[in-house]
Amino acid sequence: MARFLGGTLALTLLLHSSVQATTVYIVYLGANRLNHVDLASSHHLHLLSKVFTSKVDAERSMLYSYSYGFSGFSAKLNSTQAASLAKMKEVITVFKSKSLKLHTTRSWDFLGLTVDNGRHTPPPPQLAYGSDVIVGIFDTGIWPVSESFREPLETKPIPSSWKGKCVGGEDFDPSIHCNRKLIGARFYLKGFEQTYGPIDSEYRSPRDYLGHGTHTASIAVGSVVPNVSGFSGLGRGTARGGAPLARLAVFKTCWGKDREGVCTEADILAAFDDALHDGVHVISASFGFSPPLYPFFESSADIGAFHAAERGISVVFSGGNDGPDPGLVQNVAPWAISVAASTVDRSFPTRILIDGNFTLTGQSLISQDISGTLAAATTYFNGGVCKWENWLKKLATDTVILCFSTLGPVQFIEEAQAAAIRANASALIFAASPTKQLAEEVDMIPTVRVDILHGTRIRNYLAHSPRVPVVKIGPSKTVIGETTAPSVAYFSSRGPSSLSPDILKPDITAPGIGILSAWPPKTPPTLLPGDNRSIEWNFQSGTSMSCPHVAGVMALLQSAHPDWSPAAIRSSIMTTADTRDTSNDLILSGGSMKSIDPFDIGAGHINPLKAMDPGLVYNTRTEDYVLFLCNIGYTDQQVKSMILPSDSVTCLPSHSYRTNADFNYPSITIPRLRFTRTIKRTVSNVGLNKNTVYFVDIIKPAGVEVVIWPRIMVFSKRQQEHSYYVTFKPTKISSGRYAFGEIVWTDGFHRVRSPLVVFLNNGG
Ligand SMILES: *[C@@H]1O[C@H](CO)[C@@H](O)[C@H](O)[C@H]1NC(C)=O
Ligand SMILES: *[C@@H]1O[C@H](CO)[C@@H](O)[C@H](O)[C@H]1NC(C)=O
Ligand SMILES: *[C@@H]1O[C@H](CO)[C@@H](O)[C@H](O)[C@H]1NC(C)=O
Ligand SMILES: *[C@@H]1O[C@H](CO)[C@@H](O)[C@H](O)[C@H]1NC(C)=O
Ligand SMILES: *[C@@H]1O[C@H](CO)[C@@H](O)[C@H](O)[C@H]1NC(C)=O
């Protein structure tokens, strides 16, 4: 998504909250103990009536009663009413319904899941999996007639466990648009309309207006569609999702507003409530808020994901597009997955020929030949700063303008494009730091990205040329396999987590740059007014795109291993991830041009084939969640009401010595190492060989002694569990510095890797 439009949202929110006396609040009551929906709803109304003078007023203020997957409701309240509800004994949290923003196919071949790889090698058997798995996409809805959502030829009946439905509405007829591929479609508007007023141009139905939901759904589970491409053949190949046989259930929670996708928390929680009832197996949601983050149980997405995990449903979120500065990763709950974005080995080189004797190559998605005169930005823009407001009212007809991101600076390429369009230029050459030069999305005006070195050469040529140079550009080519990949996108949000730095986030990286996927033909590829192009496949970039890649892999894993928990699925994805690129070097971090560390990629780059057979998994038990919830400050009583079954939950009176570092997570983070500290991990044997012996290899973080006991684990049964202990001891004085390492368990066949993150702080 065009990231620079973000400012308008914050502004709109401010205006709204200042004119409204009542706001939509969410009242969260924990797990759902009443097995009857009507009972739960009347209980919610009863609670709500206590802060109103009449039951009728209470009924009128209620938006949703959440009574399937968990217990709670949303209602229009003033701050006094919200405060009184928050004081009630059974209420866990009360929070305002905030607005989230969307994070905006070659990728699957790059990940080793190839459909059309010639006659010699059959496709991997894993691709036959998935028809028994239902993936829920929380997004902007769906363009149901896209070829991506056709029934595959041999479609089995819909799984009998499915309890969801297709809800009709504007331009959406369930009897026509739903089939054995698209088996569920719902939409949630009450929270959005309460906050922003009635929708206008949007479809009042599951149909997709913005394109984002169609794109992400097609990445996760799109059916196989041969011979598709973006503009004029760029990226031609077979389009398909990660799990092309899996079923799709669409939950439209996000609505187009000023060309941005906005999703309110009241609606998101309603979608979780239904999805948990309907029987989805995997949920993919590419939205979030930029930091500061809210406490876990004051966030709909985290509450919904918590109860999903409790019911064995995997949830994956995008990590956000706020990189490359550290500490801005979003969606950091330990019961879900947070995904970073990285490149694939496809590029779109575009030739720039100046005066017939000076050639450079940039990156672009240009489909035609362009020629014109070449000019520096200073001729058309005040100070050479390529921004709309800097235009000097001089036309640049038939001219290619050279712009620098460093002047101004021009933070987003879209700003320079808007300026070039205003000047009526025929194309733009945009020079930026080498980390930012990838062609990510379709442009409104033909734009070639060059790095600052090439930009400088062009600028110097221009400055010394005795006459006006002539330039010829394009068209772009599609080149596969010649670019080293993956590298982490500069925009991908980095760790550590600002909410719980003791759990490493992001967890994993997956393709998220220049991803070609299905698109509504009525939605302009750039979303900009005046863009009349109609296409059925579009390039998009963002962690929005990497998130459904992980959802597709989770669907394959769930299908291959129906008895696996969400924690086991996450563990197998993380412990088998790659940290090296196609040149066998450590993956590069776009944004710094240096090797990655776990804050860029978590455990690494997803490897679907290896994830199918991880050998060992780190499961998460109820006791881990109890530990975590107690550690973040909830009382025994509250934790009891959040966890099902409530067992004999007690927060240890002195739990402070057991930190979240003991949470049985596949990565290990020691938040503040002052003295010697020992943590525990437990693994289960899920390999095909029940008799197996694992040995450990350690890469120690700098300045830290790491001792593991035992160093050998002998398994003789499937599902057998073993625990090991890791002792960390500082060997030097440090006053606050992160150091990284890894622990790898191997039986000669499997490699079970956990990244280590230690914050060494034993200085004065
Ligand atoms: C909040 O609403 C209640 C019930 O309608 C009302 O009695 C109360 O005066 C309101 N408080 C404020 C501060 O507006
Ligand atoms: C793919 O589509 C293009 C354009 O639509 C067509 O020219 C080409 O022959 C097709 N290739 C195959 C293998 O069907
Ligand atoms: C390019 O060719 C022109 C003549 O066509 C010549 O004047 C100019 O010096 C050449 N520039 C370079 C960099 O070779
Ligand atoms: C803008 O450029 C186009 C050619 O690209 C030209 O036909 C048109 O006349 C120009 N507009 C103005 C206002 O000069
Ligand atoms: C888009 O269509 C409108 C109206 O049909 C037209 O005025 C405009 O020039 C078109 N824009 C482009 C980029 O083709």
Image (spheres, rainbow, N blue to C red):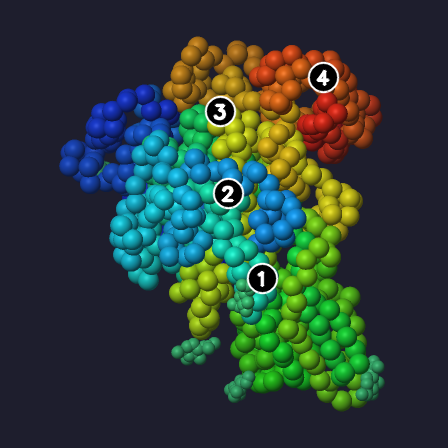
Give the residue type at disc 4. Val
Please tell me which residue is depicted at 67% across the width and 76% down the height of the picture.
473
- Compare marks 4 and 1 and give the one earlier in the sequence: 1
- Which residue has dot 1 on it? 236
- Which residue has dot 2 on it? 243
Q: Is residue 347 above or below residue 458?
A: above
**Label 1 to label 2: alpha-carbon separation:** 20 Å
10 Å crowding of disc 4: few (<14), some (14-19), many (20+): some
Please tell me which residue is depicted at 45% across the width and 31% down the height of the picture.
313
The secondary element bearing badge 2 is classed as loop
Please tell me which residue is depicted at 21% across the width and 28% down the height of the picture.
38
Instruction: Tell me where residue 573 appears, x and y as whole percent.
Output: 60, 34
Queried on whether the Cβ of the residue with tag 1 lies below 8 angstroms from ligand 2, the answer reads yes
- Which residue has dot 3 on it? 563
Q: Is residue 681 left or right of residue 3?
A: right
**Label 2 to label 4: alpha-carbon separation:** 33 Å
